[in-house]
Amino acid sequence: MSVELVATKSSDRVFAKTFPAVIGQEAGTVQVNDSVPGSCHCLVSLVDSQLVVWDLGTAGGTSVNGTRVTKAAIKPGDTLKLGGMEFQVKRRPDSRRYLFGVRS
């Protein structure tokens, strides 16, 4: 299973292929090409076949569909905001598995 986060205001794309995945600026994370998100901004993990995002205590916070969260389920089509960067959650087109109960 893999997930793609597509920036809504730039050409940035973030790919997570294994979980848990830490997204941020620090080496060893799934890196975002922007200085706005924190060094280790959020954690995305697979819990009971559902992706869940956890904010890692960042000043800018993490939002899902416009609501600031500390923990929330995410699915394709959701908007994930990390600090000042906004992404749309997508399935990877090369995935042939079921993801979020939807066949890809």
Image: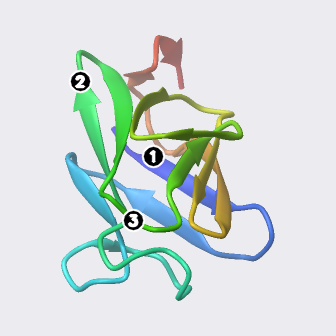
Badge 3 is on which residue? 58
In percent of width and height, residue 24 lies at 37, 73
How much space separates mark 3 and mark 1, taking CA atoms? 22 Å
Dot 1: element: strand
Q: Which quadrant of the rendered structure holds the C terminus?
A: top right
Pointer 1 residue: 3
Relative to 54, is 89 on the left or the right? right
- Marks 1 and 3: in contact by CB < 8 Å? no
- In this orientation, which residue lies closer to the viewer: 29 or 60? 60
Instruction: Name the residue at 54% across, 28% down.
Output: 75
Mark 1 Cα shell of 10 Å, populated few (<14), some (14-19), many (≥20): many
Left or right of 77 on screen, residue 41? left
Q: Extreme right residue here?
A: 9
Circle 2: element type: strand
Q: Which residue is mark 2?
A: 47
Q: Name the N-terminal-most of marks 2 and 1.
A: 1
User: Label 3 sits on what residue type?
Assistant: Thr
Q: Residue at (71%, 40%) from the top-left corner?
A: 66
Q: Which of the two marks, 2 or 3, is nearer to us in this view?
A: 3
**Distance from label 2 to label 1 (Cα)?**
14 Å
Left or right of residue 23: residue 69: right
Residue 31's x, y, as percent?
A: 39, 77
**Depicted 93 relative to depicted 59: above or below:** above
Tell me what residue is drawn at x 68 percent, y 33 percent: 77
Rendered residue at 39%/65% (across/down)? 58
Amino acid type indicated by mark 1: Val
